[in-house]
Amino acid sequence: MTVLAGRGAGKTARGIAEDIWGKEDVAAVWYSDSWMRSQVRRWIPKAEALAAGGWRELVPRVAPEE
């Protein structure tokens, strides 16, 4: 949800990371090939896909009762 809120507010991946981990931690860890940057960049398309209806794939299908 934080990722989607950040995207909706026009934040960059770094801005979203600051919302999640805090400015100090991001300043210490964020660089071009850091795990943190990679993680946020992976979360963005996943969050957008879930918001676009992909969450339905996570819901177990139940056979209708007869």
Image (cartoon, helix red, strand yellow):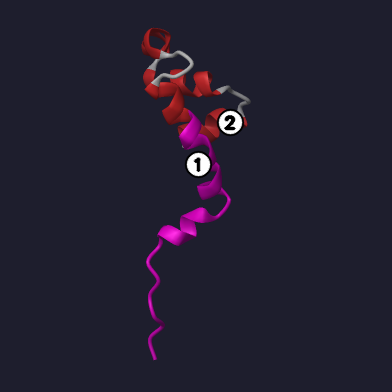
Crowd class of label 2 (few under 14; some 14 to 19; many from 20; radius 10 Å): some
The three-letter code of the residue at mark 1 reads Ala
Q: What residue is at 39 percent from the left and 91 percent from the top?
A: 66
Crowd class of label 1 (few under 14; some 14 to 19; many from 20; radius 10 Å): some
- Residue sitting farthest toward the right: 10
Q: Does residue 62 appear to the left or right of 51 in the view shown? A: left
**For the residues bearing labels 1 and 2, Cβ distance under 8 angstroms:** yes
The three-letter code of the residue at mark 2 reads Arg
Q: Is residue 50 magenta?
A: yes
- Residue sitting farthest toward the front: 33
Question: What residue span does the magenta drawing correspond to?
Answer: 41-66
Q: What residue is at 40 percent from the left and 71 percent from the top?
A: 61
Q: Which mark is residue 47?
A: 1
Q: Which mark is residue 23?
A: none
The correct choice, above or below, for 10 with respect to 61 in the image is: above
Q: Which percent across, then down, holds residue 14?
A: 51, 19
Callout 1: SS: helix
Q: What residue is at 55 percent from the left and 43 percent from the top?
A: 48
Q: Could you tell me how far apart the alpha carbons at marks 1 and 2 are, in whole angstroms?
A: 10 Å
Dominant secondary-structure state across the stretch colored magenta: helix
Q: What residue is at 63 percent from the left and 25 percent from the top?
A: 10
Image quarter for residue 64? Answer: bottom left
The correct choice, above or below, for 66 with respect to 8 in the image is: below
Q: Which percent across, then down, holds residue 47?
A: 50, 41
Callout 2: SS: helix
Q: Which mark is residue 7?
A: 2
Dot 1 or dot 2: first in sequence order is: 2
Q: Does residue 35 appear to the left or right of 16 in the view shown? A: left
